[in-house]
């Protein structure tokens, strides 16, 4: 426990070299403080690894290992197997960016899940390979400018859609997979705590804005993350064994423009005919996601056993899982 | 007898301040002025705010070596805050020039015995006025050109026009204005402290 | 007409001029600027190629393999961890005798993770069957890239152009780029005899058994040895058409009456030439030999250049832990094979981007003392901090 603040472990402590406003740093701090220092963290190559373990210094106050880009899930599998063989219960957590999850890391992740390792895999999704200079990843959304999906005479940014990694997770029928963001901390907290209470492979995809790569004001990281949710572009959902068991309902639907305008990575869409077409595409994507997860009308009363552990309110609020349902659900965090 | 020219300049800044661009622009300008030149950075992974160094060599003969600059003739400091934590002046030659982005004279720029020349200018504020962001680099380049006479203002402007063309005409014009103001700041100043 | 170009830019332009039809890559520092420029060219219609963002380097290498078998000129680039991740495919490409060309932006290999230049990455795959050329400048990088396609397509062997990460990729220096017409003249349209085609079906990549495998390797080895001539010839042809040479297999500097010669590869040679000049000014008979083509290993030519030299030093930016310098070991073997028993001083330096400065090179020329008996290689000293550096550090206030 960090002596300076009795309510924080500071597993990721200060002095690291993240950019100001880094969404990944915020998310990592949230997650690792919720999990705590009694865990083994396996980190893939990427921004978090680089800014937290730069040049013979480390910002980690918990056991932490970094190997290469593609293998974090496999290394974690080995860690977990060894702990099991030694009769130890220390939790194992993988931290990877979207590169180490969606693309180069997908093979090892799939293997880890398929074999059923008791590992929590956390993806800090900033939607591009930020560490190496903002190149596109499978997670980069449609029409985004990156350095390898640049707009040009014949291009409006990334052609392809954002890879639906949650559906890939669902197809593994893994015990728990969920999305979260830095803008909804109680939601993220509930999901981390829930995940930590489940055995087997678990997955969290946390939308983590990158002011540099998304080209927005570094003070707006949380705002931008919130807008991603409020427009329906990034639904906050939970899947257990492939079935949808939790949805954070939206009070209303904001137009995607609200989300796109503050970000320079979409700037090219606001000039010209082709850009306007893409804006309509993006709105259509948001609408489709809202329909798919029924975000505007989701019935937030679920009766699965795990859902009952977290009572919900109509507008998407959560009660801390540490309070029992009967104690009164007036405390909406 | 041909006068041998060999000059080394070191830039210090933070990621996001255009330090590497500044070095490239200086080398480009020298090249426009028919010198051999070379520019390259020393930095870690892409990270805004982290300390960055960049080097320039200017010569009238082919530059073959690719190592870092250890004995610069000029040190350009794009972020005076770095003076607190980094040995920015290491190797600066006797009588060398320090160009500092600062609103006022900075005390701990060591100048006791080595007869360095110093130039201070509020490059970030000047940059902000022209570019809308506190980018000091082109302002400092103008100051450097005036302070050394090693590259012409015209060559710098040509370099800016070529190198920043992808950012659009407005940015090119704004950067040229920033260059000129930096240049004018130094060339109109009294004799710098030595 | 020279321009001041970043090394990555020079390479990207050279690639564009070679008209590849498929470019596939996965970003890794310090190669990123190369592929970003190519992506922009494709996005602007300036390069008529499929630009494929691979899911990993293993994918990228596999994509260019597939592209070449289907009759398209292809390009990829990587470094360090990425090169190692694609290693299985590198062997595969070479064994299939495919004319793939790639750039390796030489970078140290982790652990510990390090993004700066050394040659451990390309050295690690020296047995994969790729031709490996090490360039010393951005000009040579661009020119070698163009030559590489000719060499690859003539020999049906893949070619890796190795250029130092950051030291060349991120350095601006003068480069003359040829015109499209000049490159088209030198490099004809892509032709590959074993292109997959329903009109003439072929099976590529079948299995082999003990009674025929060795012959594949014999052929491959012979093709690699023959490639030495091809590298020289095509460089000479390039010189005729473009007016400058890359050095063929190797390039000497003030070798004529040199008693001490330092052999090395890549951008470190610039500082070596400066050191040679200084030593010569002091009356010492020093010289340098830049090895450009490491694979195939041009043993005969090396022996020719070094047979009368009294003191041979190899300075390299890689090592085989537990064995020592790699180039040094191969040179020793070549000399001994020719009956030349001149000892080779093996010096390793510049690892992980450690700067090889003029004073370090000078110390290497003067001789690195043995630290232990029986050691096969020594390590170059660090840049010697000057007295004024120390004084400055003392005077800094830490607020």
Image: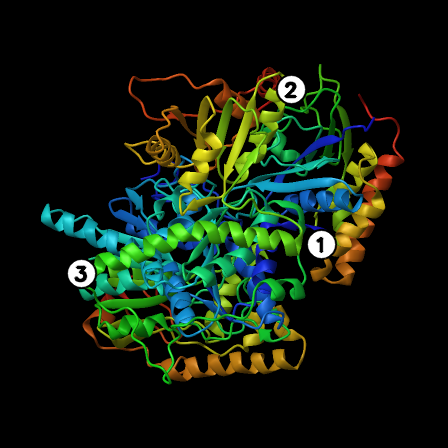
Q: Chain of mark 1?
A: B
Q: Nearer the viewer, mark 2 or mark 1?
A: 2
Q: Secondary structure at mark 1?
A: helix
Q: Which mark is residue A199?
A: 3
Task: Decide which of C238, A22 is in the foreground and name it.
Answer: C238
Q: Secondary structure beneath disc 3?
A: loop
**Marks 1 and 3, how far apart in space?**
56 Å
The quarter holding residue C359 reads top right
Disc 2 and disc 3 in contact, CB within 8 angstroms: no
Q: Nearer the viewer, mark 2 or mark 3?
A: 2
State the residue at coordinates (51%, 55%). Answer: C32
Q: Nearer the viewer, residue A292 or A138?
A: A138
Residue underneath mark 2 = C281
The numbered mark 3 sits on a residue in which chain?
A
The label number, if any, that marks residue B163 in the structure image: 1
Quadrant location of the C terminus of chain C in the rendered image: top right
Q: Considering only vertical position in the picture, is C156 above or below A131?
A: below
- Do the residues bearing badges 2 and 1 touch, measured as CB atoms within 8 Å? no
Residue visible at 39% across and 59% down in the picture:
C57
């Amino acid at each position: 426990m960090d002596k300076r603040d009795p309510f924080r472990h500071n597993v990721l402590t200060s002095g690291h070299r993240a950019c100001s406003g880094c969404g990944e740093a915020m998310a990592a701090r949230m997650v690792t403080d919720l999990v705590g220092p009694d865990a083994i963290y396996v980190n893939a190559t990427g921004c978090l690894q680089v800014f937290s373990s730069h040049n013979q210094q480390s910002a980690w106050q918990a056991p932490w290992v970094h190997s290469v880009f593609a293998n974090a899930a496999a290394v974690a599998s080995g860690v977990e197997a060894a702990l099991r063989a030694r009769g130890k219960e220390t939790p194992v957590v993988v931290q990877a960016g979207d590169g180490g999850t969606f693309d180069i890391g997908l093979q090892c992740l799939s293997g880890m899940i398929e074999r059923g390792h008791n590992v929590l895999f956390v993806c800090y999704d900033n939607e591009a390979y930020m560490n190496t200079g903002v190149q596109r990843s499978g997670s980069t959304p449609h029409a985004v400018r990156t350095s390898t999906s640049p707009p040009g005479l014949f291009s409006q940014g990334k052609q392809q859609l954002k890879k639906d990694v949650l559906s890939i997770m669902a197809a593994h029928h893994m015990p728990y997979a969920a999305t979260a963001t830095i803008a909804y901390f109680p939601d993220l907290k509930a999901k981390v705590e829930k995940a930590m209470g489940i055995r087997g492979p678990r997955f969290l995809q946390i939308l983590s804005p990158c002011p540099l790569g998304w080209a927005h004001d570094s003070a707006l990281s949380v705002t931008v993350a919130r807008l991603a949710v409020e427009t329906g572009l990034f639904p906050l959902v939970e899947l257990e064994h492939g079935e949808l068991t939790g949805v954070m309902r939206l009070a209303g639907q904001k137009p995607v423009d609200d989300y796109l305008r503050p970000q320079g990575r979409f700037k090219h869409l606001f000039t010209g005919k082709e850009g306007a077409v893409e804006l309509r595409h993006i709105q259509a994507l948001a609408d489709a996601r809202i329909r798919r997860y029924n975000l505007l009308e989701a019935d937030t009363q679920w009766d699965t056993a795990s859902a009952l552990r977290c009572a919900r309110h109509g507008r998407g609020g959560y009660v801390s899982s540490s309070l029992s349902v009967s104690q009164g659900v007036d405390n909406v965090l | 007898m041909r006068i041998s020219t060999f000059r080394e300049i070191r830039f210090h800044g933070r990621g996001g301040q255009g330090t590497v661009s500044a070095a490239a622009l200086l080398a480009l300008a020298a090249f426009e002025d028919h010198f051999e030149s070379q520019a390259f950075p020393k930095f870690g992974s892409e990270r805004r705010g982290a300390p960055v160094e960049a080097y320039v060599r200017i010569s009238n003969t082919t530059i073959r070596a690719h190592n870092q600059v250890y004995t610069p003739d000029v040190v350009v400091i794009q972020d005076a805050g770095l003076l607190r934590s980094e040995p920015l002046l290491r190797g600066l030659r006797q009588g060398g020039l320090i160009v500092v982005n600062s609103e006022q004279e900075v005390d701990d720029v060591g100048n006791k015995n080595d007869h360095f020349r110093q130039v201070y200018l509020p490059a970030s504020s000047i940059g902000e006025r022209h570019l809308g962001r506190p980018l000091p680099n082109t302002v400092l380049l103008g100051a450097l050109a005036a302070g050394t006479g090693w590259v012409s203002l015209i060559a710098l402007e040509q370099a800016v026009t070529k190198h920043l063309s992808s950012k659009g005409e407005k940015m090119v014009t704004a950067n040229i204005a920033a260059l000129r103001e930096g240049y004018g700041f130094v060339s109109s100043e009294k004799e710098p402290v030595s | 007409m020279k321009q001041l170009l970043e090394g990555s830019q020079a390479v990207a332009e050279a690639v564009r001029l070679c008209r590849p039809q498929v470019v596939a890559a996965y970003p890794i520092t310090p190669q990123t600027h190369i592929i970003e420029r190519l992506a922009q060219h494709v996005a602007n219609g300036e390069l008529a190629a499929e630009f494929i963002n691979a899911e990993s380097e293993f994918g990228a290498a596999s994509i260019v393999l597939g592209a070449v078998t289907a009759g398209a000129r292809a390009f990829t680039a990587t470094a360090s961890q990425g090169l190692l991740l694609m290693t299985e495919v590198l062997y595969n490409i070479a064994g299939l005798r495919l004319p793939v060309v790639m750039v390796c932006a030489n970078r140290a290999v982790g652990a510990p993770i390090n993004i700066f230049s050394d040659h451990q990455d390309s050295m690690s795959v020296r047995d994969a069957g790729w031709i490996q050329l090490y360039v010393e400048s951005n000009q040579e990088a661009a020119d070698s890239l163009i030559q590489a396609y000719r060499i690859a397509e003539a020999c049906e062997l893949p070619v890796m152009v190795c250029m130092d990460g950051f030291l060349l990729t991120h350095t601006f220096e003068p480069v003359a780029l040829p015109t499209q017409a000049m490159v088209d003249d030198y490099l004809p349209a892509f032709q590959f005899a074993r292109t997959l085609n329903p009109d003439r079906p072929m099976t590529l990549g079948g299995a082999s058994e003990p009674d025929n495998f060795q012959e594949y390797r014999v052929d491959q080895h012979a093709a690699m040895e023959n490639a030495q001539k091809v590298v020289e010839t095509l460089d000479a042809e390039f010189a005729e058409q473009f007016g400058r040479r890359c050095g063929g297999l190797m390039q000497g500097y003030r070798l004529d009456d040199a008693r001490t010669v330092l052999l090395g590869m890549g951008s470190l040679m610039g500082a070596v030439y400066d050191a040679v000049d200084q030593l010569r000014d002091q009356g010492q008979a020093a010289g340098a030999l830049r090895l450009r083509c490491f694979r195939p290993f041009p043993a005969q030519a090396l022996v020719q250049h070094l047979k009368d030299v009294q003191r041979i030093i190899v300075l390299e930016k890689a090592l085989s832990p537990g064995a020592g310098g790699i180039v040094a070991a191969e040179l020793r073997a070549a000399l001994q094979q020719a009956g030349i028993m001149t000892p080779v001083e093996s010096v390793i330096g510049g690892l992980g981007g450690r700067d090889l400065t003029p004073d370090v090179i000078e110390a290497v020329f003067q001789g690195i003392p043995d630290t232990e008996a029986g050691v096969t290689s020594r390590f170059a000293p660090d840049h010697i901090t000057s007295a004024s550096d120390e004084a400055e550090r003392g005077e800094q206030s830490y607020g």
